[in-house]
Amino acid sequence: MGKSVDVVQSELVRALAGLMDLEAEYAALADPTNVALDDEHDSEGSTVGFERARVAGLLERSRRHIAELEAAAQRVAEGSYGYCTSCGKAIGSDRLIALPATRLCIECAS
Ligand SMILES: [Zn+2]
């Protein structure tokens, strides 16, 4: 199970870095003193609003993914990681590497 545990940790680090990038991007879009955005806004009215909605959607997805990875890390700490929370069977290592945060085996997920 060591390899899968490493995947959870590295995926969590990667997801947190991605979240920081998104938060910086969102802050830049929300900044009324950002002159570049003002120019863009003047020439093409809906662009900034559209971009903000897009980044907000990505932020939400990123935060949800991080919450799932943190729950997976918690299961690692408890020793229950890698077992389906529905039927209790071991989840295949291929599935865990592809989806480190998953809590269901392939049968229960489908
Ligand atoms: Zn299952």
Image (cartoon, grey):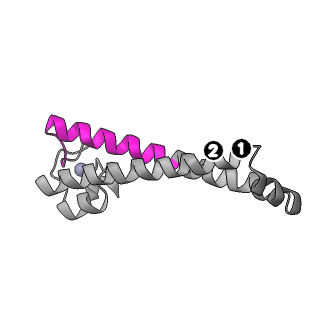
Tell me: 57 left or right of 20: right
Which residue is tagged 2? 27
Could you say whether the residue bearing mark 2 is in a helix, strand or loop? helix
What x and y, as percent, mark residue 28? 65, 48
- Asked if the residue under mark 1 is in contact with the one under mark 2, i.e. CB atoms within 8 Å, the reply is yes
Q: Which residues are magenta?
A: 61-83
- The label on residue 18 is none
* Residue beneath the point at 76% across and 44% down: 33
What x and y, as percent, mark residue 62? 47, 49
* Residue beneath the point at 11% across and 53% down: 2
Q: Amino acid at mark 1?
A: Asp
State the residue in front, 80 or 77: 77
Residue 80 picture quarter: top left
Q: Residues within 10 Å of mark 1 (few under 14, many from 20)?
A: few
Q: Amino acid at mark 2?
A: Ala
Which residue is tagged 1? 31
Q: Residues within 10 Å of mark 2 (few under 14, many from 20)?
A: few
State the residue in front, 32 or 54: 32
* Residue 1 in view in this figure: no
* Residue 21 in view in this figure: yes
Residue 32 picture quarter: top right
* Residue beneath the point at 83% across and 58% down: 39
Magenta region includes residue 74 = yes
Could you say whether the residue bearing mark 1 is in a helix, strand or loop? loop
Quadrant, the C terminus? bottom left
* Residue beneath the point at 76% across and 57% down: 36
Tell me: 26 left or right of 50: left
